Image (spheres, helix red, strand yellow):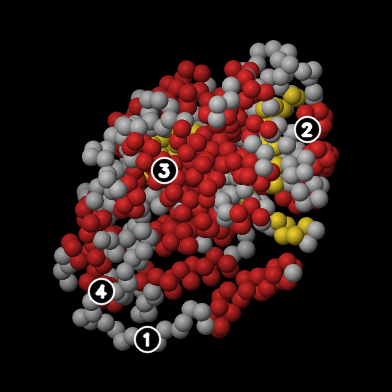
């Protein structure tokens, strides 16, 4: 049966406007041609089959009989059809049936490989359930075991051997309309250290949230791992390690590779392609963001994203404690990209409020691995100098806490359980409502657990963590920790920056994102113990941040877009990815309709999701 181009687009569930839009998915026909052109192995396969089974267009059992006939794929699926809601139910049941987080992760990756829209619909509708699997903390295990679970290409690997040819490598990606790239060199993955090329897991995890939370179409996104070797001896000796088995290349050779990469991105995808740096080791993270911030559209998530999400938390502490930020004493444990990014954004915020730099820095202390940062330490790095205090050295964190009596303690050390009983009790002794941010990821690296934090402060601490922690019952009160993770800001920042075609991203954007996030936290959230909105609201938060960021970029004339949209909200809404597709075409021919079973019927739920219901019941009983 012959099928017109327009009918094909309809069957596959894309709107005509999307098909014609430069922002829409790649054209099915073009894609078929590219796949089959001059390829002896695929010449004998019908092009429509490729297109229909392509993960971006596949609808699985949601193809109606009429569509199957039109597309020439009748018989590939059993004769039942499923509505998109029934498909979603099936995915949920499969997801729940798998108990191990890494097995759940692999299941979802396989789903993504065959049915992209269903994957993203599941992510957006079950965000709370899925985030710990596709992102922190499971993504840590994914990176640690990357060689073992590696399947098919999910991004581009650019190695030190590709110098002089990065343009060609970028051109090998299947999509040509890339608008954002998440790049890591694997130098410091979460709190897990140097994971070399296995860092690809983090780039893909971050980008999954660009779509799931930020609504950015996935075909506009590209994950990159810069493979310059690794200093991780365990990986070098691991037979399944997938990266270059050499020591990390450093110095000018490494810097030149990054420079070539930046220039190649501009050459291949255009000058306002958003480049997101992720999990570079601290000195490199600072070096590149300082070098490139004002000449490329780029951002460092660990410095600026974490800075922004934690500043939002500080704004919440102000509300809960009724003490202004300048009345608080801050102690940062760790002097890496997160700590310095937060501390610098905090200083900017205080200075924006009219406080002199010197006074802003006065109440900000840093305690790194070698002890409290004081002025008598020789060769202090530039970033630390403004926070170095005229004090005698203190080696142990417990003693620093006792001495300076911080009201806000921030941990970004990658050292699990650093905030021990003594540290937490000491905080609680000096403040009615101290705040603790245990930011290190994954969960095993968290400076303390929510339970420890509440237990050793008689439930008075305002606790937030980088990893998700379940609510804790303490003194008959249920306390819900907030997730102080950059995932609450970076999808929105990316949405705003790339939809507005920003030439570069000024620091003010991170303050705007922090205020937008803080304003999204309700009194109810704060009463329950959290400084952040619930993860289930993360889509709305991302849109609100995207809108404010885009408006700022337009207002400051930083956009390459002409003309500038009159209604930014409408423009942004039109830009969003919609994982929904239609289930029906007008009927001219169908198999007989079978009686469908309602999804919420007792038997169906019991059969497939029974376990969850029982678990929920137990949880509720425990809470009572
Ligand atoms: O990925 C996360 O959960 C937060 C983050 O950027 C990091 O820990 O490096
Ligand atoms: Mg990171």
Residue named by callout 2:
405
Give the mark toward the camera: 2 or 1.
Answer: 2
Q: Residue at x 80, y 42 (%)?
A: 428
Gap between marks 3 and 1 measured at Cα: 49 Å
Residue named by callout 4:
585
Q: Residue at x 25, y 47 (%)?
A: 22
Q: Any mark on residue 109, and which?
A: none
> Are circles 1 and 4 on residues that touch, CB within 8 Å?
no
> Residue 115, position in %: x, y?
39, 61
Q: Earlier in the sequence, mark 4 or mark 3?
A: 3
202 lies left or right of 6 = right
> Residue 544, position in %: x, y?
44, 49
156 lies left or right of 237 = left
Gap between marks 3 and 2 measured at Cα: 37 Å
Picture quarter with the C terminus = bottom right
Q: Earlier in the sequence, mark 3 or mark 2?
A: 2
Residue named by callout 3:
548
Q: Earlier in the sequence, mark 4 or mark 2?
A: 2
Q: Earlier in the sequence, mark 3 or mark 1?
A: 3
Residue named by callout 1:
594
Picture quarter with the N terminus = bottom left
- Between 329 and 284, the one nearer to me in the picture: 329
Gap between marks 4 and 3 measured at Cα: 39 Å
Q: Secondary structure at mark 4?
A: loop
Q: Secondary structure at mark 2?
A: loop
- Between 169 and 624, the one nearer to me in the picture: 624
Residue 466 in view here: no
């Amino acid at each position: 049966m012959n099928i017109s181009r327009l009918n094909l687009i309809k069957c596959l569930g894309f709107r005509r406007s999307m098909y014609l839009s430069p922002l829409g998915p790649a054209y099915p026909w073009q894609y078929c041609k590219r796949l089959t052109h001059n390829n002896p192995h695929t010449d004998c396969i019908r092009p429509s089959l490729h297109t229909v089974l392509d993960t971006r267009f596949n609808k699985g059992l949601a193809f109606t009989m009429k569509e199957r006939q039109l597309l020439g794929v009748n018989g590939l699926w059993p004769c039942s059809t499923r509505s998109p809601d029934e498909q979603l139910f099936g995915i949920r049941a499969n997801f729940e049936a798998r108990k191990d987080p890494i097995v759940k992760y692999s299941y979802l990756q396989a789903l993504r490989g065959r049915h992209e829209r269903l994957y993203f619909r599941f992510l957006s509708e079950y965000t709370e359930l899925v985030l710990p699997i596709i992102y922190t903390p499971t993504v840590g295990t994914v990176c640690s075991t990357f060689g073992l679970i590696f399947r098919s290409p999910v991004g581009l690997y650019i190695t030190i051997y590709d110098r002089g040819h990065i343009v060609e490598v970028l051109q090998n990606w299947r999509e040509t309309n890339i608008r954002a790239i998440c790049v890591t060199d694997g130098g410091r993955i979460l709190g897990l250290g140097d994971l070399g090329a296995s860092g690809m897991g983090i780039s893909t995890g971050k980008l999954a949230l660009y779509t799931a939370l930020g609504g950015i179409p996935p075909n506009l996104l590209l994950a990159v791992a810069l493979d310059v070797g690794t200093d991780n001896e365990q990986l070098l000796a691991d037979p399944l390690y997938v990266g270059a088995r050499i020591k990390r290349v450093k110095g000018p050779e490494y810097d030149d590779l990054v420079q070539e990469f930046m220039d190649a991105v501009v050459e291949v995808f255009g000058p306002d392609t958003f480049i997101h740096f992720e999990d570079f080791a601290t000195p490199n993270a600072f070096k590149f963001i300082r070098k490139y911030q004002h000449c490329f559209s780029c951002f460092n998530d660990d410095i600026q994203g974490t800075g922004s999400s934690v500043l939002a938390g500080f704004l919440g502490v102000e509300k809960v404690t009724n003490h202004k930020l300048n009345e608080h004493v801050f102690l940062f444990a760790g002097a890496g990209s997160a700590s310095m990014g937060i501390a610098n954004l905090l200083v900017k915020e205080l200075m924006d409020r009219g406080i002199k730099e010197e006074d802003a820095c006065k109440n900000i202390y840093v305690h790194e691995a070698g002890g409290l940062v004081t002025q008598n330490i020789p060769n202090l790095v530039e970033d630390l100098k403004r926070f170095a205090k005229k004090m005698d050295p203190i080696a142990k964190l417990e003693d620093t806490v006792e001495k300076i009596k911080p009201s806000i303690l921030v941990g970004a050390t990658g050292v699990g359980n650093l905030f021990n009983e003594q540290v937490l009790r000491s905080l609680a002794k000096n403040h009615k409502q101290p705040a603790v941010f245990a930011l290190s990821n994954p969960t095993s690296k968290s400076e303390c657990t929510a339970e420890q934090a509440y237990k050793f402060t008689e439930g008075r601490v305002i606790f937030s963590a980088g990893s998700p922690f379940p609510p804790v019952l303490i003194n008959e009160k249920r306390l819900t920790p907030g997730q102080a993770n950059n995932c609450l800001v970076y999808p929105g920042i990316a949405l705003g920056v790339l939809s507005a075609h920003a030439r570069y991203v000024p620091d003010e954007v991170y303050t705007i994102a922090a205020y937008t996030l803080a304003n999204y936290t309700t009194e109810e959230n704060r009463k329950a113990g959290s400084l952040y909105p619930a993860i289930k609201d993360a889509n709305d938060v991302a849109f609100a941040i995207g809108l404010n960021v885009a408006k700022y970029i337009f207002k400051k004339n930083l956009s390459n877009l002409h003309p500038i949209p009159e209604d930014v909200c409408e423009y942004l809404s039109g830009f969003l990815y919609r994982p929904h597709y239609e289930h029906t075409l007008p009927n001219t021919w169908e198999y007989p309709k079978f009686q469908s079973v309602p999804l919420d019927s007792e038997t169906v739920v019991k059969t497939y999701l029974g376990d969850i219901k029982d678990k929920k019941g137990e949880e509720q009983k425990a809470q009572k």
